Image: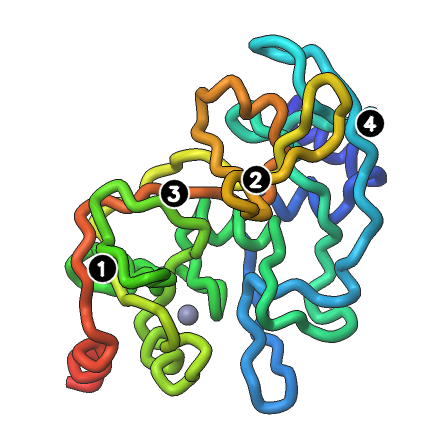
Amino acid sequence: MRRDQHLSSVGGMLPDYSTAVLRRPRPRQYFAGTVRVPYIAPWTGENAPPATITTRLGRGGMGIGYADEYGIAERRRGALWIRVPVKPGAGAPLLDRVHALRQRQAMNFMLCQYCGRPTDDRRDGRRLFLLHAGTGRPITDGEKTTTPPVCEGCAVEARGRPSARRGCVAVLVEEATAWGVAGLGYAPATLRPVPGEHGERFTFVAYGDPRLRWTLACREVVALHGCTVVDLEDLRERTAA
Ligand SMILES: [Zn+2]
């Protein structure tokens, strides 16, 4: 198979990334003391200096790229993805941060952000998301998020965690569709990163948007449809019943 040959040939260059990005992971649960480490949390051992960004002529025109880029593993729907080492368990976990590749995997395969297992554990086929409620704004159809779903067991456990409850709203979702990426925009003239809107770290860019070619993707963004806000207390009762 040609694709497999390519993958093995690239193995020396991107050993963890190229395989991890394409396959559904078999997650292992790590602990920090007695605390379960979320699947999407990065570890200090996964730090690496940023790769050099250059310009590249691709489908649709000029954009950013890597000098030693390998297409299948590093691009998706035209977006160039940030390179991150994959060494879960190495060093100490950074509990409040997000590992770009595991976030992408969690979104692509609809895996629980806490345990990394599939979130298809509801009989009605809906998936549960714990979203940041922000300033109390309503959750509307087409809501865009970088926060992967949660399985019911982990949602119930999250109830007891003040950090998870604070400012979070639980939403049952009928369908989550690929929308675009959140990432760092680069100025075509200078190849310098451009600050996001309203001082945000990342800019949200939809698939098909010409700005995608100048964006280094750091998070997968999905749009949520058929949203129903629920109370986490109700979930616990239903699960216990
Ligand atoms: Zn879970």
Q: Relative to the observer, which residue lies in front, 174 or 19?
A: 174
| Amino acid type assigned to the residue bearing label 1 in the image | Leu
Q: Quadrant of the C terminus?
A: bottom left
Sequence-first tag of 1 and 2 = 1
Quickly name the residue at label 2. Answer: 196
Q: Position of residue 16 (x, y in %)?
A: 73, 49
Considering the numbered disc 1 on the image, is that residue within a helix, a strand or a loop?
Answer: strand
- Residue of label 4: 68
SS assignment at label 4? loop
Q: Residue at x 20, y 52 (%)?
A: 227
The span from disc 3 to disc 2 (Cα, nearest Å) is 19 Å
Between disc 1 and disc 3, whose residue precedes? 1
Mark 1 vs mark 2, foreground winner is: 2
Q: Quadrant of the N terminus?
A: top right
Question: Within 8 Å: ligand 1 and the Cβ of disc 3?
Answer: no
- Considering only vertical position in the picture, is 115 above or below 19? below
Q: Residues within 10 Å of mark 1 (few under 14, many from 20)?
A: some
Residue wearing tag 1: 172
Depicted 48 relative to depicted 38: above or below: above
- Marks 2 and 4 sit apart, C-alpha to C-alpha, by 27 Å
Residue at image mark 3: 222
Measured from the top left, where is residue 212 in percent x and y?
55, 25
**Along the polypeptide, which appears first: circle 2 or circle 4?**
4
Q: Amino acid at mark 3?
A: Val
Residue 141 found in image quarter: top left
Q: Determine the CA span between mark 1 and mark 2.
A: 29 Å
Circle nearer the N terminus (4, 3): 4
Residue drawn at (61%, 76%) of the image: 30
Query: Residue 47 lies in what quarter of the image?
Result: bottom right
